[in-house]
Image (tube, rainbow, N blue to C red):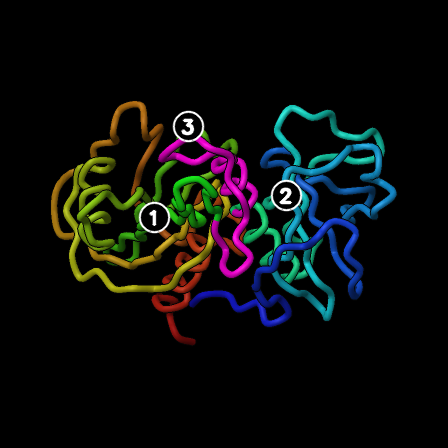
């Protein structure tokens, strides 16, 4: 159930200053914030000329026959007046899937670059490796690869009802499936059981894999599962869950965006239990 993005192909290469190549798409970041121009288009070189030299510049993939190049400046730099900040969620529906896939990778790599300017082992300044996607310490040889944080997200079913909850940081009125980060030594299935027990007070079983989605907030990999209710009474975890409940498909609240993994799981279950004509 993972959404494919055949037009974007990830790769990696250090780009030397002043190097000439084929046409490029430049993804500029101030910290973790992507800069875009009017009508949500990526900036051209002229738009960025007054920003000074970036911390890092490298190719991270190709899209539509063009190289995708990242330029990362430190957080706190002033956004040029002709540009604005673009967010992955806000660009849904404006950018094609392949370009959004490029943005997912780029934003996670921007976090990686900013988090590894200095070596975590000895404190020296890090360099970009030319042979692999890694930051390398020239003093002690320590390597830092892009971080990926697995998250188990599960849609719990009970007959013709599904379990949805509302977190305080959600958009107003929106509900979604329960999710949590996988802890050290834990399988994704064990994480899901624990998170649902902690956040909802119930037990689940018959856990089956649905699909995955890379999620750049800031470097998550969402692992989606369907599960069946086994027992217990709903008790929302204090401070983590504002509201929780069982919902029929004819009375659903506001749901996540259609491109999200949570929404795709909801729609798959809706289709599976819909009455046949």
Where disc 2 sits, the SS reads strand
In the picture, the quarter occupied by the N terminus is bottom left
Report the residue marked by disc 3: 168
x, y percentage for residue 38?
83, 42
Density class for disc 1 (Cα within 10 Å; few <14, some 14-19, many ≥20) is many
Where disc 3 sits, the SS reads loop
* Residue for point 87% across, 43% down: 46
* Residue for point 60% across, 57% down: 60
x, y percentage for residue 92?
63, 51
**Residue reaching furthest right?**
46
Where disc 1 sits, the SS reads strand
State which mark lies toward you, 2 or 1.
2
Query: Above or below — where is 22 with respect to 115?
Result: below
Query: Above or below — where is 169 with respect to 253?
Result: above
x, y percentage for residue 277?
43, 76
Mark closer to the chain start, 2 or 1: 2
* Residue for point 45% across, 59% down: 264
**Tag of residue 56:** 2
Mark closer to the chain start, 1 or 3: 1
Say how many tags the image has. Answer: 3
Report the residue marked by disc 1: 151
Looking at the rendering, the stretch of residues picked out in magenta corresponds to 109-134
Prevailing SS of the magenta stretch: loop
* Residue for point 74% across, 56% down: 25
**Cβ atoms under marks 1 and 3 closer than 8 Å:** no
Q: Nearer the viewer, residue 58 or 238?
A: 58
């Amino acid at each position: 159930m993972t959404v494919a993005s055949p037009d974007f192909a990830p790769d990696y290469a250090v780009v030397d200053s002043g190097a000439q190549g084929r046409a490029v798409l430049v993804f500029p970041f101030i910290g973790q914030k992507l800069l875009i121009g009017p009508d949500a288009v990526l900036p051209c070189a002229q738009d960025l000329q007054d920003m000074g030299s970036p911390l890092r510049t490298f190719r991270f993939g190709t899209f539509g026959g063009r190289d995708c190049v990242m330029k990362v400046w430190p957080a706190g730099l002033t956004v040029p007046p002709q540009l604005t900040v673009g967010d992955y969620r806000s660009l849904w529906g404006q950018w094609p899937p392949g370009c959004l896939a490029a943005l997912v990778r780029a934003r996670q790599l921007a976090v990686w670059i900013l988090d590894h300017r200095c070596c975590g082992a000895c404190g020296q300044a890090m360099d970009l490796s030319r042979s692999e996607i890694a930051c390398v310490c020239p003093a002690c040889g320590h390597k830092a690869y892009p971080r990926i944080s697995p998250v188990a997200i599960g849609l719990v079913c009970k007959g013709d009802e599904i379990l949805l909850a509302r977190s305080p940081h959600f958009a107003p009125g929106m509900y979604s499936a329960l999710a949590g980060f996988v802890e050290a030594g834990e399988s994704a299935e064990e994480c899901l059981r624990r998170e649902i027990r902690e956040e909802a007070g119930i037990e689940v079983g018959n856990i089956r894999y649905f699909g995955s989605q890379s999620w750049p907030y800031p470097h998550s990999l969402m692992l989606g599962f369907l599960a069946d209710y086994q027992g217990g009474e709903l008790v929302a975890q204090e401070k983590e869950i504002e509201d929780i409940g069982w919902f029929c498909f004819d009375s659903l609240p506001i749901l996540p965006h259609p491109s999200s993994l949570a929404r795709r799981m909801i729609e798959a279950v809706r289709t599976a239990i819909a009455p046949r004509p």
